Image: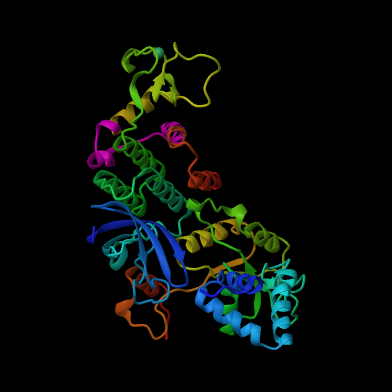
Amino acid sequence: MSSISTAGILLRRIEYGDHDLILTLLTQDYGKISMIAKFARKSRKRFPGTLELFSEITLVGVSPRKGGMPVLQEAALKQPFAGIRGNLLKTAYASYWSELVLTWLEEQKAQKNIYRLLRYCLGALDAGQPPAVTSIVFQLYFLQFSGLSPNLRQCGRCRGALEKLPGEKFGFDLEKGGLVCKGCLTGKTPEWQLSRGTVKQLLWIQAGNLKNIRRLRFTEPAIKESQMFLEAFIPYHLGREPKSLKFLNHIRQLGS
Amino acid sequence: MIQYPASITRLIRNLSKLPGIGEKSAERLAMYLLQARKDQVVELADSLKDLKEKVRLCRQCFALSDEDLCKICSDPARDGAVICVVEHPVDMIAIEKSASFNGHYHVLQGLLSPMDGIGPEDIRIRELIGRVSKGGVREVIIATGTNVEGETTAAYIREQLAGYHVRVTRIASGVPMGGELKYVDQVTLKKALEGRHAV
Ligand SMILES: [Zn+2]
Ligand SMILES: [Zn+2]
């Protein structure tokens, strides 16, 4: 990579020295990339208003011949998603997704499906679609594209298919990544459970794609259940609690 | 490189830790100090020591201060019913230089940043609410930056103060003085148009 030209979404912005910014972007063609934007903080004309978190930009970057971090040469705003900033709940969700992308993805390995997913979900937030449902969609597809889809088709212990499992509520084995039916549940009742209806909706998302996601209708209890489930499943497989999840929980509590 | 005596090497090493000072500059500064008058060097050393021993945060507004209560908070000529909220002490100094504000300040010492794990407990938001809840505050002006962290912090403060009898305002943002419109981004222009006023 000597010179690149692509689109990217800004995930992270760190002040560097007196004048510069170090940016981490999820780019369309090169995956996650860190770049330095020289004089971005000193000159208003250099990158006017383009280098804000969650913005989609088109960019030109050049790798120095002697190695080191690519330097951002040009940037133009493609989609600012300006409806996100200034709104606590939307910012909290966008931060959570960005942190997942930042921690999970490898540097410079293109993942176009995750790029499209993030852009779609930021656009949905910006357009005022329900953040909680959008987050369920983001997390499910993100897991799927990362090869970590939870198995919701059968009980992970007795292997019984969902349609044949007794009861209307299921547990979930985070370690094995699968449902646990009533018959296989041992010990005390788990903290949270998934109703049959919720499992079916999650399966519908897993089997579908972003194009028909607008038809999705979630009931309030199904949102709650899915949220509990995914926000336990992801930290478990990430190996730690994402920092922004704490903030998200705090903001959700304020709202309720 | 010439081998300096240990005391000079130590000074060079310490000076070169300062921002913007490389080994060469550190060496030049050390040589200058070596030749300078003794009282001049002692004055410099004392001021460095004082910096760490005397400077603290004002107990009311968290600005840098030599006293328990800073100069602004203890000035009877300033209006304590108006509080201007800023991120860092340097922002407060920038507003002071503009000579356009005669109230008190509240220095948050940071901004909310979900991805860095900086939440409301990590900056001085609770202390701000405390000042407002004591009464006597008419207006809170939120003067954090317009980046995502600045806007998030402003939104959070607005929410937290919603239950109090206080006017909460946000500084205006828009086209910079002497700026050309073609250099202004679309988000700023939209805000500038929304915030237009009669002339
Ligand atoms: Zn079973
Ligand atoms: Zn003070």
Of A89 and A95, which appears nearest the observer? A95
Q: Tell me: residue B33, above or below residue A60.
A: below
Q: Tell whether position A38 is magenta.
A: no
Q: In the displayed orientation, state which residue is furthest to the right.
A: B68
Q: Nearer the viewer, residue A26 or A196?
A: A26
The percent position of residue A110, horizontal first and vertical second, equals 25, 47
Residue A177 in the figure: left or right of residue B130: left
Give the vertical position of A1 relative to A220 (above or below). below
The residue shown at (70%, 86%) is B40
Answer whether residue A223 is magenta in the image.
Answer: yes
Instruction: Decide if residue B53 is in sight here.
Output: yes
A83 vs B123, left or right, is left
Q: Quadrant of the C terminus of chain B?
A: bottom left
Give the residue at x 54% y 61%.
B111
Q: Which residues are magenta?
A: A206-231
Left or right relative to A175: residue A110: left
Residue A222 occupies which quadrant of the picture? top left
Where on the picture, by quarter, is residue B4? Answer: bottom right
The residue furthest bottom is B37
Pick the residue in front: A211 or A243. Answer: A243
